[in-house]
């Protein structure tokens, strides 16, 4: 544990030194952009790439630094702590995982054309998966023709869609199998429309429509079993999406304690009242327990123990961390009363932003059902291994 604490301290210093000013600049305009529903400006997103932050976890072959899984999770935690824009790490993770999946294809043409520019911050990318339906009911179709393929359909929600130059699109072929393909925003027949979500308003969310979009064969990233490909993407997102909110919940706890310490009741700081101290203690427990479980899941992935499609420890960490992060924000709101409602522009935004974590990369209910089914299935095993722990 001491080694992890020392490593976290080094990561904290790294992020503050290399990217602290940039993250603060992005966060300084978030209240206005949240009201206007606009993502970080292109120049700042480009700076995320040019300063090496976007590529930090990506392979060196595309210009990244290839840091390990635990380090990247800690970096995301510090981004969440330092930057008040909750959507920024969400956009970054989607783009980074798309670049990583392109690298895994081994296709030099696609790597050079898309993955390298994404790592450099020169190309935005979004995953076009959701259709407000399960994958077996998708209506987005990829049909063969004499020259290649024709893509038709509609994706209801794409994080960073307004910033995306390329989309990783999942569609069904004529036989009912799912494929993964790369579609550019300027391809004929592609229409991008801003979306209006309840939270994460600065994520540049969009819906994307494909009207008989012609695609050459070389744009097919996964020609068979795209569902497994998509599930691997969603599984990795379960791990990443809670790291930055964990950092933000730490900042919310500290801000709440500071405000209560400066608020007097009968000449006594409110923060020193026993019931308030108990509430702050519960918030501290929530942050530390969520961090411990996330670090455990990160270490499991880094050691190669995690299942690529559905890992129970990773999924449990996502469920638990989401509940703890939301409890910290809600308790801070209750403790600060009128100040939480009227006196800050940020707390209400975090409540809206983090509400979406409960449905992201698999809803809490679905993950709990799958975890319970796994418990039943493992009951008959003759013995346990460290990989099950």
Image (cartoon, rainbow, N blue to C red):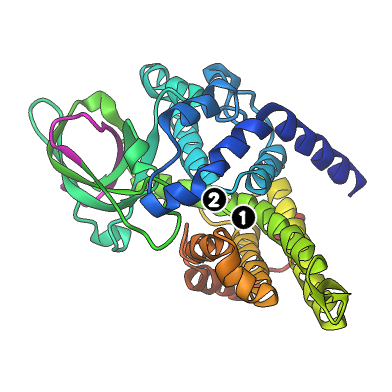
Give residue 83's position: percent from left, percent from top. 61, 44
Which residue position is annotated with label 1? 245
The residue nearer to you, when weighing 199 against 3, is: 199
Which residue position is annotated with label 2? 86
The residue nearer to you, when weighing 135 against 208, is: 208
Write the residue at 56% across / 52% down. Answer: 241
Write the residue at 61% across / 55% down. Answer: 245
Magenta segment, which residues? 174-191
Give the quadrant of residue 42. Answer: top left
Q: Is residue 13 above or below residue 351?
A: above
In the rendered structure, the answer to whether residue 198 lies left or right of residue 259 reads left
In the rendered structure, the answer to whether residue 280 lies left or right of residue 194 reads right
Give the quadrant of residue 40. Answer: top left
Q: For the residues labelled 1 and 2, say whether their Cβ atoms are less than 8 Å apart.
A: yes
Element marked by disc 2: loop
Q: Which of the two labelled residues, at mark 1 and mark 2, occupies the earlier sequence position?
A: 2
Give residue 74's position: percent from left, percent from top. 71, 43
Q: Is residue 157 above or below residue 259?
A: above
Q: Is residue 113 above or below residue 235?
A: above
Element marked by disc 1: helix
Residue 343 lies within the magenta run: no
Per the rendering, the mark at residue 360 is none
In the rendered structure, the answer to whether residue 155 lies left or right of residue 50 reads left
Residue 175 lies within the magenta run: yes
Q: Residues within 10 Å of mark 2 (few under 14, many from 20)?
A: many
In the rendered structure, the answer to whether residue 274 lies left or right of residue 94 reads right
């Amino acid at each position: 544990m001491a080694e992890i604490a020392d490593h976290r301290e080094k990561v904290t210093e790294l992020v503050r030194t290399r990217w602290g000013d940039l993250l603060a600049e992005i966060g300084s305009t978030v209240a206005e952009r949240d009201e206007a529903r606009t993502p970080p400006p292109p120049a700042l997103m480009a700076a995320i790439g040019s300063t090496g932050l976007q590529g930090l976890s990506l392979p060196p072959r595309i210009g990244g630094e290839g840091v390990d899984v635990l380090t990247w999770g800690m970096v995301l935690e510090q981004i969440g702590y330092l930057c008040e824009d909750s959507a920024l790490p969400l956009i970054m993770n989607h783009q980074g995982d798309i670049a990583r999946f392109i690298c895994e294809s081994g296709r030099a043409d696609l790597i050079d054309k898309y993955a390298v520019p994404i790592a450099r911050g020169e190309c935005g990318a979004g995953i076009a998966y959701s259709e407000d339906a399960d994958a077996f009911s998708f209506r987005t179709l990829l049909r063969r023709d004499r020259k290649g393929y024709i893509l038709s359909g509609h994706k209801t929600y794409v994080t960073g869609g307004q910033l995306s130059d390329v989309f990783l699109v999942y569609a069904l072929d004529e036989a009912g199998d799912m494929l993964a393909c790369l579609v550019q925003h300027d391809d004929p027949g592609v229409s991008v429309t801003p979306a209006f979500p309840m939270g994460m308003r600065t994520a540049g969310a969009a819906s994307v429509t494909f009207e008989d979009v012609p695609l050459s064969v070389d744009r097919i990233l996964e020609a068979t079993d795209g569902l497994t490909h998509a599930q691997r993407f969603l599984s990795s997102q379960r791990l990443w999406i809670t790291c930055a909110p964990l950092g933000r919940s730490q900042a919310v706890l500290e801000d709440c304690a500071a405000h209560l310490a400066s608020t007097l009741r009968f000449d006594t700081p409110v923060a020193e009242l026993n019931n308030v101290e108990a509430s702050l203690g519960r918030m501290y427990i929530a942050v530390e327990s969520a961090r411990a479980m996330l670090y455990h899941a990160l270490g499991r992935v880094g050691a190669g123990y995690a299942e690529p499609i559905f890992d129970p420890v990773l999924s449990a960490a996502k469920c638990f961390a989401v509940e703890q992060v939301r409890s910290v924000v809600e308790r801070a709101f209750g403790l600060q009363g009128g100040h939480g409602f009227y006196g800050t522009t940020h707390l209400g935004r975090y409540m809206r932003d983090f509400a979406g974590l409960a449905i992201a990369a698999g809803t809490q209910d679905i993950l709990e059902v799958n975890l319970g089914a796994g418990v039943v299935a493992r009951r008959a095993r003759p013995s346990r291994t460290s990989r099950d722990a």
